[in-house]
Image (cartoon, rainbow, N blue to C red):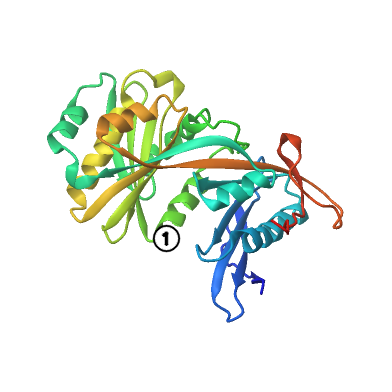
């Protein structure tokens, strides 16, 4: 018997998005899959939705996964979204389903991990203490100090030209309220957001930064959020300098922390060498998929179309 698809109410509503949820359950009411659709609402991103699709390994993906996908894509259309983005692990059944239903690959990401016990403190210290004339390091937990707040907001544009393949994720300008919201979101998850910044001695402005979200328990794995240097300050080794300081801080302050996680676009020629130099090892590959939407009549047999555009309703194929 086909799984039952139930729409749920999700309290995850923020200033930049809200989330819709569907649960698939079997005849006994046991959950066998879920779909999450994050509907972005900030100006510049209000044409986008982000999809997460999960189906239990023992459940046939073809029917349950497709019905969850249908529900999410129909909702994206109903909310006026023109594009849906998602990411899946390479070689997974979900990847096959999405590719067959009009999603196209726009970015390849390599996930990597640094085992903190293997981190060479002496080597890290050597990198951190190497002089960078005209710059100094600053760091903080949680919200940026008031003295650096304005320049930190201004420095966020350093991420605007991060290689993103064909992902249509329009850069949204940062302000202090958005910085506060990002810190609050990390705290709500129980994480400590640690930031290391390179500050120009010339004018006291932040030239670049790196962020690390550490579990509040100090155990398990921490997650790098981003490392970026403003274009006018690149080519001076600031990225490696800041990230080495972040790794050393995690190693010394959190003795029970297992490792640090990161994912980097394969075409990011700046960050990948930094990760390699610090000893991060690749763990798996994920693909960022993107799908264009346009309205469809409910009776259409909605397959993927050339160019990656699909109808809002997708139908299973029987007799396979």
Query: In the image, what residue occupies the spot 21% across and 30% down?
Result: 128
Q: Position of residue 103 (x, y in %)?
A: 65, 43
- The reply to whether residue 200 is visible in this rendering is no
Query: In the image, what residue occupies the spot 26% across and 58% down?
Result: 219
The one of 151 and 289 positioned closer to us in this rendering: 289
Q: Position of residue 248 (x, y in %)?
A: 21, 40
Residue 22 location, quadrant: bottom right
Q: Is residue 3 above or below residue 215?
A: below
Q: Position of residue 49 (x, y in %)?
A: 65, 49
The one of 34 and 63 positioned closer to us in this rendering: 63
- The reply to whether residue 220 is visible in this rendering is yes
Helix, strand or loop under label 1: loop
Local crowd size for mark 1, using a 10 Å CA cut-off: few (<14), some (14–19), many (≥20): few
Per the image, the residue denoted by label 1 is 189
| Image position of 114 (left or right of 190) | left
| Image position of 118 (left or right of 197) | left
Query: In the image, what residue occupies the spot 30% across and 29% down?
Result: 240
Quadrant for the N terminus in the image = bottom right
Residue 136 location, quadrant: top left
The residue most toward the bottom is 28
Q: Position of residue 137 (x, y in %)?
A: 27, 32
| Image position of 43 (left or right of 198) | right
Residue 61 location, quadrant: bottom right
């Amino acid at each position: 018997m086909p799984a039952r698809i139930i729409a749920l109410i999700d309290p995850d509503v923020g200033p930049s998005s809200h989330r819709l949820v569907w649960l698939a359950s079997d005849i006994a009411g046991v959950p066998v899959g879920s779909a999450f659709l994050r509907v972005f609402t900030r100006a510049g991103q209000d044409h986008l939705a982000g999809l997460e699709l999960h189906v239990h390994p023992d459940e046939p993906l073809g029917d349950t996964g497709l019905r969850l996908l249908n529900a999410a894509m129909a909702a994206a259309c109903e909310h006026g979204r023109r594009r849906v983005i998602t990411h899946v692990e390479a070689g997974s059944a979900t990847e096959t389903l999405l590719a067959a239903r009009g999603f196209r690959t726009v970015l390849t990401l390599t996930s990597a991990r640094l085992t903190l016990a293997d981190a060479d403190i002496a080597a890290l210290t050597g990198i951190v203490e190497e002089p960078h004339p005209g710059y100094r390091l600053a760091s903080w937990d949680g919200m940026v100090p008031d003295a650096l707040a304005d320049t930190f907001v201004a420095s966020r544009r350093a991420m605007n030209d991060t290689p993103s393949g064909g992902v249509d994720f329009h850069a949204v300008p940062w302000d202090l309220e958005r910085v506060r919201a990002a810190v609050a979101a990390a705290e709500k998850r129980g994480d400590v957001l640690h930031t290391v910044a390179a500050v120009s001695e010339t004018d006291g402005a932040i030239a670049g930064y790196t962020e690390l979200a550490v579990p509040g328990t100090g155990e398990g794995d921490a997650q790098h959020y981003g490392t970026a240097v403003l274009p006018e300050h690149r080519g001076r080794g600031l990225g490696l300098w800041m990230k080495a300081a972040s790794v050393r801080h995690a190693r010394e302050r959190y003795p029970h922390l297992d490792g640090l996680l990161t994912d980097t676009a394969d075409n990011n020629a700046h960050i990948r060498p930094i990760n390699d130099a610090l000893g991060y090892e690749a763990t798996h590959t994920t693909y960022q998929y993107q799908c264009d939407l346009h309205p469809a009549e409910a009776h259409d047999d909605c397959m993927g179309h050339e160019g990656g555009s699909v109808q809002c309703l997708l139908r299973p194929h029987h007799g396979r």
